[in-house]
Amino acid sequence: MQNNDLATKLDLLDLKASTKQDLLDVVEKMEERLATLIRDVSDRQLASQSELEARLNQRIDEKTERVETSLLTEFHKWGHTAEAKFRILPVIEERLTILEERISAIERGEAPPKPH
């Protein structure tokens, strides 16, 4: 068909088929581009999520370490104080025993034993 020639029905059918194929090609390319964009966005989202999880885990680990350190420090302080009290306990028990013996002797009307 020349530029000035009249179009036949066959020419119009060819043009329709060609246009339809061109449109299908454009749609296919757009679908491919869209699928690529969706994959890229999905990959970036997964990377961001992984990075966020890593940062969150790091912060949790840091805070857990601080809490553990604080607890251990406080337990150590308590243990040190308790240990000192337990060292004094036998001395107190001995003195208490001596006092009980002296009180028992007084109650029986005897002279209390002399302190050691």
Image: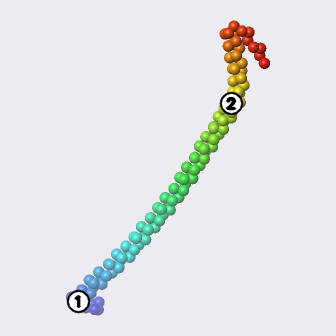
Above or below, 45 against 100 in this view is: below
Which one is nearer the viewer's eye here, 90 or 66? Answer: 90
Q: Residue at x 31, y 82 (%)?
A: 21
Give me the disc on residue 42: none
- Would you name the residue on which mark 2 appears? 86
Residue 18: horizontal and vertical position, in percent?
30, 84
> What whole-number distance in Å separates the C-alpha atoms at marks 1 and 2?
111 Å
Mark 2 falls on what kind of element?
A: helix
Q: Residue at x 68, y 30 (%)?
A: 86
Left or right of residue 27: residue 111: right
Q: Report crowding for label 2: few under 14, some 14 to 19, many 20 or more residues within 10 A (C-alpha).
A: few
Q: Quadrant of residue 30?
A: bottom left
Q: What kind of residue is marked 2? A: Phe
Residue 52: horizontal and vertical position, in percent?
51, 56
Q: Residue at x 63, y 41 (%)?
A: 72
Determine the residue located farthest toward the left in the rendered image: 9
- Would you name the residue on which mark 1 appears? 10
Q: Quadrant of residue 106?
A: top right
Q: What kind of residue is marked 1? A: Leu
Mark 1 falls on what kind of element?
A: helix
Q: Is residue 81 visible?
A: no
Lower sequence index among marks 1 and 2: 1
Which quadrant would the N terminus be assigned to in this image? Answer: bottom left
Residue 92: horizontal and vertical position, in percent?
70, 23
Left or right of residue 110: residue 41: left
Q: Are marks 1 and 2 in contact (CB under 8 Å)?
A: no
Which one is nearer the viewer's eye here, 38 or 5? Answer: 38
